[in-house]
Each structure stands twice: as C-alpha cells, then as structure tokens.
C-alpha cells in the first residue's frame, strides 16, 4: 500500500474521531427527547463519506510544512465534513431525493417519523422543514468546529476570509443550480460554472488552499496559482466523474437509485454535452423525459443510450483524463514538499477514478 493511501486511512480515522468529539460536546443541548432526533440524524449522516475534502486540506497543510500529526489541524479539516453534510441535506430537499449514501435522505427520515407518530399536518412538509433546520445546524456547527479547532489564532485569522468565501461560493452554486434547472436550457459552459461553484471549488480547490494558508501563515501568490492550476482541474474532473456516476453508477457505490440524476432533472455537464451533439429526435427524448420523477428503468436506459450515442459519455471521460493530466503537470513544479506532491497526485487519481 502506498504511504499516501495509508495516510488517507489515518486522515479518515482522525477526522472521524474529531467529529465524534465535537458531536459529544453538543450532546447536552439535545437531552430533551423532542430534539434528540436532530442530533441522531446528524450523527448518522456524518458516519459515512470518503473524507476527501479534509484530505486535500491536510495535504495542503503538509505541503507548506505543517506538522504530520497536529490534532488541531484534523479538527479544522473535519469542519469541512459538517459543511459538506449541510450542503447535501439541503441539496436532497431541493432535488426531492429519497436516498443518500444508501439511507433515507434527511427529509424522508423526518417525514417517516411524522407518519409513524401520526402527527397533524403534512408529513412531507414537516420532513422538509426539519431537514432545512438540520442543514442549517450543520452549517452553524461547521463554523464553530473551525473556530474551536485549537489552531493558533493568527493562522485561523489568516484563513478565515477563505473559509467564509468558500461557504458563500457554495450557496451561490446551489442557487445557480436551481436557476439552471428552471430555465431548462443549459450549455456546457453554464453547467461547468454551476459545477465549479457548487462542488468543484469547495471539494478540492478551497480545502487545499485552506491547508496551504494555515501552514504558511497567510495567502501567497504561489498558493493561488497552484490551487487554480491543480485544484480547479481536479475539482472539474471530480464533478465530471460525479455527473457520470449519477447516470451510470452502481447504486451500491453511489448510495442512490440508478439514474437518479435523470429523474431529478440535473442539468449537468454530461447532459449539456449530450444535448449539444443530439439529433432533433434525441434532443426531444432528453427534454421530454429528463426531470420526470416517475421515470422507469426503461426510460433511464433510453436516456443512457442517447448519452452514449451522442458521444457525450466518451467526451466527458476524455475531459476527465485531460483535466487530470493538467493537475498532475501542475504538481511537477509546485513548491510543496515531495511527500505532499506524491499524495496529491494519488488523491487526484482517487477523486476522479472510474467506479462504474
């Protein structure tokens, strides 16, 4: 096993430990049985995930000379998982998703609780309202965990504007995603813009930048250049892979039903590519069925066939390879430690690998 792969296991373990410790600190506020389900839902939601965002933060930190085993850094990096969980909870409400990581999405979980108890009013509305509150709580906690991580105040102060900007970018990306779907017309460039703001930047580029700035003591021109060249390339490739998995992925891997992105009507880069190359009949098939929540497996298969026949799937696979190559080239001359350079190369491959 490569040293970086073994270190990724350590990062996961330390991030998990930091999250458990943080949630245990919150536990006294949830002693009432009426509000305990909020904490339980948060714990379940945070129990899974590959922890890639903390890993990019960690290797940014190490790349600029940070200590290998600083528990405060693991805690700060773990706050990114709270931010990610907040985004996913809200995203599932907006997309009306039933599953997340193989479990009921948060709003379906609370809806089922309402139905089981036989409470008054709409179970669906209660579920969505409770999930919004859970997502807000996770967002608040992400800031609290970051601030109380134990890192020196000057390091946190230097990185705080980046942390705030990352969260603003994420919210703007969520809004752009909503806008893209209701407009019903998208280009590859507009889908790319959404993907960068909604996922690519806060998944790779900004976590990496945070780690570098925390260890360096402040922003430096080379950090921005490196994060844009390496981080943005990996972020786009990462989102392209996610687009493909959302249509062709194995439910056992994705934790969601096959073709769920098609039922949700997501205007991804993959769909934009397909529409740009589609014949009139193929384009009509996409427009007619994309976003149908009752889309059966036969309809999913028809859309998959269009995506393959238009060359969109192969084009996006090539783009992933091209962006990955750009990221690896950016590593060659980067002024980061050799160990970090090797780990970031492995992370880029892992984040964009085929898992279908």
Image (spheres, grey):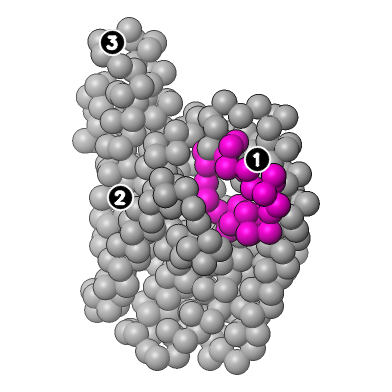
- In this picture, residue 175 sits left or right of residue 244: left
Residue under pointer 3: 119
Give the side of residue 243 with respect to residue 116, left or right: right
Q: Closer to us: mark 1 or mark 2?
A: 1
Determine if residue 119 is in view: yes
Q: Position of residue 288 (x, y in %)?
A: 58, 37
> From the image, which quarter does the N terminus lie in?
bottom right
| Residue at screen point 24% across, 21% down | 34
Gap in Å between the C-alphas at discs 1 and 2?
39 Å
Mark closest to the chain's N terminus, 3 or 2? 3
**What segment carries the magenta color?**
264-290
Q: Which residue is mark 1?
A: 285
Q: Main secondary structure of the magenta part?
A: helix
Does 346 sit above or below residue 140? below
- State the CA–CA distance, disc 3 to disc 2: 28 Å
The span from disc 1 to disc 3 (Cα, nearest Å) is 42 Å
Residue situated in front as seen by the camera: 291 or 333: 291
Residue under the image location 57 percent in, 74 percent down: 233
**Residue farthest along the front direction in this orientation:** 280
Residue displayed at 40% across by 91% down: 221
* Mark sitting on residue 139: 2
Q: Is residue 179 above or below residue 44?
A: below
Q: Earlier in the sequence, mark 1 or mark 3?
A: 3
Question: Pointer 1: residues within 10 angstroms few (<14), some, or many (20+)?
Answer: some
Tag 3 near tag 2, CB within 8 Å: no
Residue 34 vs 157, above or below: the answer is: above
> Counting other residues with Cα less than 10 Å from the Cα at mark 2, is it few (<14), some (14-19), or many (20 or more)?
many
SS state under label 1: helix
Residue at horizontal 42 percent and vertical 76 percent from the top: 209
- CA neighbours of label 3 inside 10 A, class few (<14), some (14 to 19), many (20+): few
């Amino acid at each position: 096993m490569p040293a970086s792969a073994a270190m990724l296991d350590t990062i996961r373990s330390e991030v998990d430990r930091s999250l458990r410790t943080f949630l245990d600190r919150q536990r006294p506020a949830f002693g009432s049985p009426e509000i305990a389900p909020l904490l339980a839902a948060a714990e379940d939601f945070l129990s899974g995930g590959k922890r890639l965002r903390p890993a990019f933060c960690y290797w940014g930190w190490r790349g600029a000379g940070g200590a290998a085993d600083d528990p405060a850094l693991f805690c700060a990096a773990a706050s990114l998982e709270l931010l990610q969980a907040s985004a996913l909870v809200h995203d599932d409400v907006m997309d009306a998703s039933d599953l997340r990581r193989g479990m009921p999405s948060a709003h379906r979980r609370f809806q089922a609780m309402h139905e089981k108890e036989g409470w008054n009013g709409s179970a669906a509305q209660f579920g969505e309202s409770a999930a919004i509150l859970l997502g807000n709580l996770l967002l608040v906690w992400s800031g609290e965990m970051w601030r109380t991580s134990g890192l020196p105040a000057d390091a946190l102060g230097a990185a705080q504007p980046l942390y705030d900007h990352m969260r603003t970018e994420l919210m703007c990306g969520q809004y752009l995603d909503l806008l893209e779907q209701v407009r019903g017309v998208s280009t590859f460039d507009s889908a790319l813009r959404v993907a960068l703001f909604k996922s690519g930047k806060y998944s790779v580029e900004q976590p990496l930048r945070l780690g570098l700035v925390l260890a360096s003591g402040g922003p430096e021109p080379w950090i921005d250049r490196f994060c844009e060249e390496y981080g943005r390339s990996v972020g786009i490739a990462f989102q392209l892979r996610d687009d493909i998995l959302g249509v062709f992925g194995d439910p056992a891997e994705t934790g969601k039903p096959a073709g769920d992105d098609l039922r949700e009507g997501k205007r991804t880069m993959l769909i934009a590519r397909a529409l740009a190359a589609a014949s009139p009949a193929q384009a009509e098939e996409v427009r007619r069925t994309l976003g149908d929540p009752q889309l059966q497996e036969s309809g999913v298969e028809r859309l998959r066939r269009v995506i393959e026949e238009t060359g969109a799937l192969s084009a996006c696979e090539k783009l992933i390879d091209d962006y990955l190559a750009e990221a690896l080239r950016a590593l060659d001359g980067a002024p980061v430690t050799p160990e970090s350079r090797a780990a970031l190369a492995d992370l880029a491959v892992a984040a964009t690998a085929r898992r279908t």
